[in-house]
Amino acid sequence: MHEAAQENPFPDSRVLGEGPRPHPWLDPVLPLLGRWQGEGRGEYATLEQGFRYRQEITFSHDGRPFLCYEARAWLIDESGAAVRPSGRESGWWRVTPDATLEVLLAHPTGIVETYVGRAAGAECEMETEGVARTPLAKEVTGTRRHYAVRDGDLTVTQFMAAVGQPMQRHLTARLRAVPTL
Ligand code: HEM
């Protein structure tokens, strides 16, 4: 005999004023809350040429002192037309009372990253403490990220040390807040 499914009584919210009240420790990262979409450019020393992509990022919370994070990107051509799915990641942004960030991100490419960073004035900076890789994953040894919300835009930059290369820029994107579904 199957029990009837129940509506989760503790839904996530990505809109301020809807759902649970954000935990006070989340104050420094509240500007990130919501759904963002925009375009970025990528590069790396091992690649013959750069690339363009669109990316969608959502940040939500359930009243506890962490954000639920999800990001999906797809490559686009010069005219902006979609080419193929690309980088995808999900994880948790834990925030402490002194605005230290502890971030966990998992990638379908066999990589799990743990970061430590800081949130201040609508900007977040973080650097990897650890990178774990499955046997077939590419050799990524460290990553640095910067997120900034300014005038309704979210800019995201990512530097990476990987495949024998020193830390260098891989991604830069500018996203705008979009209405939640
Ligand atoms: C917006 C997200 C991302 C996009 C659009 C993106 C896109 C790309 C593209 C187009 C390439 C060239 C190879 C290919 O065509 O697939 C590439 C290479 C690579 N990316 Fe990313 N990437 C993203 C995020 C990441 C992240 C988060 C990591 C690390 C955790 C990463 C690590 C790498 C590595 C290691 C390579 C291979 C370099 C090489 O072997 O030459 N990427 N990326």
Image (tube, rainbow, N blue to C red):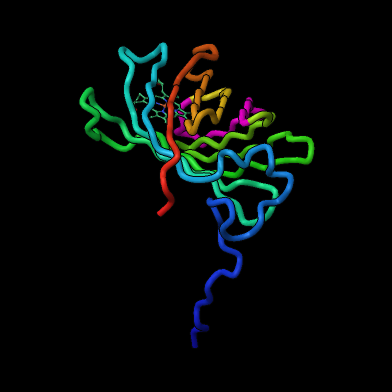
Q: Position of residue 73 (x, y in %)?
A: 38, 36
- Residue 136 colored in magenta in the image: yes
**Closer-to-camera residue (144/177):** 177
Q: Can residue 16 be seen in the rendering of this structure?
A: yes
**Closer-to-camera residue (114/175):** 175
Q: Quadrant of the C terminus?
A: bottom left
Please give the name of the residue rendered at 45% of the width and 39% of the height, measured from the top-left corner: 177
The extreme right residue here reads 98
Please give the name of the residue rendered at 32% of the width and 21% of the height, measured from the top-left corner: 51
Q: Which residues are magenta?
A: 122-138
Please give the name of the residue rendered at 69% of the width and 42% of the height, measured from the top-left corner: 27
Look at the picture and state if 45 lies above or below 33.
Answer: above
**Closer-to-camera residue (24/9):** 24
Q: Position of residue 79 (x, y in %)?
A: 20, 26
Q: Position of residue 123 (x, y in %)?
A: 61, 28
Total marks in image? 0
- Residue 148 colored in magenta in the image: no
Quadrant of the displayed image that contains ligand 1? top left
Please give the name of the residue rendered at 39% of the width and 21% of the height, measured from the top-left corner: 42
In terms of secondary structure, what is the magenta stretch mainly?
strand
The extreme bottom residue here reads 1
Q: Position of residue 55 (x, y in %)?
A: 39, 35
Look at the picture and state if 1 lies above or below 24.
Answer: below
